[in-house]
């Protein structure tokens, strides 16, 4: 006597995990394929033949394929649901939750909060005093958004424009604080003009520039002169 046990579709196809996380760089080009672990069905024959669907597409193999360029600063996460169905009757199915995290690349330069900066300083202000702050932000993430500040050059405008190398001010590389480093004299020079660079710490490094003006304010430090 030979007894053949015929399969019925009594096993639901299952993924090894209920959910997974995938990381993609935002520079990942369209048509890039990411293969996922397939589901398993304990049935046999056509009852174990599996079909996957995602966004109204289906295939016998399980791939995620990018269709457009990513921009992490716009959308940094995608949540998808992959459905696997067998070919039995009745058709049985299960799902896999897929979380896609978009990883940052350094594609945004720093941006200053102001186009230009102007600070008014009394000529008797003590050396080392805080006279202002330069501030910028970066839309990137992590180390790509860390900013350092640098003073590039100085122009002094008295009665005429000229360039000098003396350090009248300094700037804190981390927080952008502007500090007075030299004695001011309104009667000698009334205006100081700087270029400040803000650079991020990404690779490649991206930079932005702003103009900073220091306007010296007069204090009553001169005796009147009497001419006879």
Image (cartoon, grey):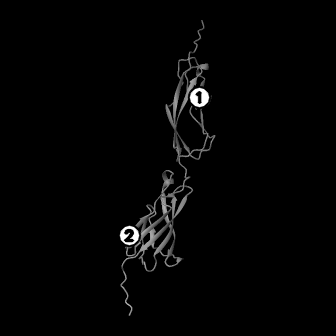
Answer few, some or many: residues within 10 Å of disc 2's Cα (few below 14, many 20 plus, some between 14 and 19): few
Residue underneath mark 2: 129
Secondary structure of the residue carrying tag 1 is: strand
Q: Position of residue 89 (x, y in %)?
A: 57, 17
User: Quadrant location of residue 224?
Assistant: bottom left
**Rendered location of residue 149, percent (x, y):** 48, 63
Q: Quadrant of residue 109?
A: bottom right
Farthest residue, direction top: 1
Residue 68 makes an appearance in the image: yes
Q: Is residue 14 visible?
A: no
Eyeballing the image, is 156 above or below 106? below
Q: Quick one: label 2 or label 1, which is nearer the N terminus?
A: 1
Q: In this view of the protein, which residue sits in the foreground, 117 or 149?
A: 117
Q: Nearer the viewer, mark 2 or mark 1?
A: 2
Q: Which quadrant of the rendered structure holds the C terminus?
A: bottom left
Q: Secondary structure at mark 2?
A: loop
Residue at 50 percent of width and 79 percent of height: 159
- In the picture of the structure, the residue carrying the numbered disc 1 is 52
Report the front residue among 227 and 197: 227
């Amino acid at each position: 006597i030979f007894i053949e046990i015929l399969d019925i579709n009594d096993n639901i196809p299952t993924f090894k995990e209920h959910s997974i996380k995938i990381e993609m760089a935002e520079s990942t080009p369209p048509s890039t394929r990411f293969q996922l672990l397939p589901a398993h069905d304990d049935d046999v024959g056509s009852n174990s033949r599996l079909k996957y669907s995602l966004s109204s597409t289906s295939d016998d193999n399980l791939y995620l394929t990018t269709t457009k360029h990513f921009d992490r600063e716009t959308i940094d996460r995608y949540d998808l649901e992959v459905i696997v169905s067998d070919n039995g009757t009745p058709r049985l199915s299960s799902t896999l939750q897929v979380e896609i995290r978009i990883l940052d690349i350094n594609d945004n330069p720093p941006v200053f909060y102001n186009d230009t900066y102007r600070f008014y300083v009394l000529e008797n202000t003590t050396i080392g005093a805080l006279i202002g702050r330069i501030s910028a932000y970066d839309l990137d993430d992590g180390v790509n958004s860390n900013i350092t500040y640098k003073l590039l050059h100085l122009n002094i405008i008295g009665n005429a424009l000229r360039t000098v190398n003396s350090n009248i001010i300094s700037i804190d590389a981390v927080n952008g604080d502007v500090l007075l480093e030299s004695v001011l004299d309104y009667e000698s020079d009334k205006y100081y003009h700087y270029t400040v660079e803000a650079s991020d710490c990404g690779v490649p490094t991206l930079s932005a520039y702003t103009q900073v003006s220091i306007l010296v304010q007069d204090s009553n430090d001169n005796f009147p002169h009497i001419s006879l």
